[in-house]
Amino acid sequence: MNTGHILLVDDDPVLLQALPHTISLRMSGVQVETADSASEAFDLVQQQEYDAVVSDIKMPGMDGLDLLEQVLARYPDIPVLLITGHGEHELAIRALRGGAYDYIQKPIDRDDFVASLSRALQTRQMRRQIQTQQHSLEQYALSLERQVAQRTREMVATSAAKDDFVDMVTQELLGPLSNLKEVTRTFGVYLQPLDGAEKVREGLVEMEQSVRRIESLVLELQAVQDRKVPFPSARF
């Protein structure tokens, strides 16, 4: 079952009636809005959130390629599908190079259209889930970093309790840190083939670097206890 909010753009009134009907019959739970020009469509995109935009390429004034460029510049996570005329391979290639999620040739095959749109909606949903997970992981990493910083300050201030403190830090943090590193690596591998996820990958790399810094400090604290030498100064 697909769910989502779609914007359909075409200057052909017949197509603006036919495609929403096709979507309503084959994709339950999908809401469709229409616009008869690219400029009107871009105004709508700025006013509300859509899960996919489907637009004809050839339209008077602002065409589908212009709309694609404008939408991706501001809302890069929204999949944009462009409709081309039969045999317009050059336009199709330009659309894909410009960042279009897919292209659909006229005359439109209903099955191909629905399949492509379904994939676009699934991609949009997956991107949202990844962003949510990334935010949760970032918050978790930040919490761990703050916890280590606090424990380190306490350790420096209360050297008499250093052995108990190091035991507590290593036991409490090494396990969660290991799990967090594995999750970030898994997300990084999963994101490799996914279009439009470069920013998310960059965020995961930065987060993994932060986790490594925390782990290095925890291991150093553990080594200090094993060697029974004075504690290093706090780094935070």
Image (cartoon, rainbow, N blue to C red):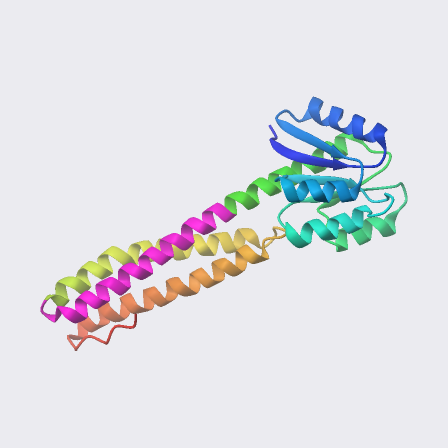
Q: Position of residue 113 (x, y in %)?
A: 75, 34
Between 60 and 27, the one nearer to me in the picture? 60
Q: Position of residue 96 (x, y in %)?
A: 76, 51
In the rendered view of the protein, which quadrant contains the C terminus?
A: bottom left
Residue occupying image coordinates x 43% and y 61%: 208
Residue stretch rendered in magenta on the structure: 131-160
Residue 73, compared with residue 38, is above or below; it is below
Residue occupying image coordinates x 80% and y 46%: 64
Residue 168, compared with residue 40, is above or below; it is below
Say whether residue 103 is visible: no
Q: Is residue 10 left or right of residue 140?
A: right
- Queried whether the magenta region covers residue 115, the answer comes back as no
Residue 175, compared with residue 14, is above or below; it is below
Between 83 and 208, the one nearer to me in the picture? 83
Say whether residue 22 is visible: yes
Residue occupying image coordinates x 15% and y 75%: 228
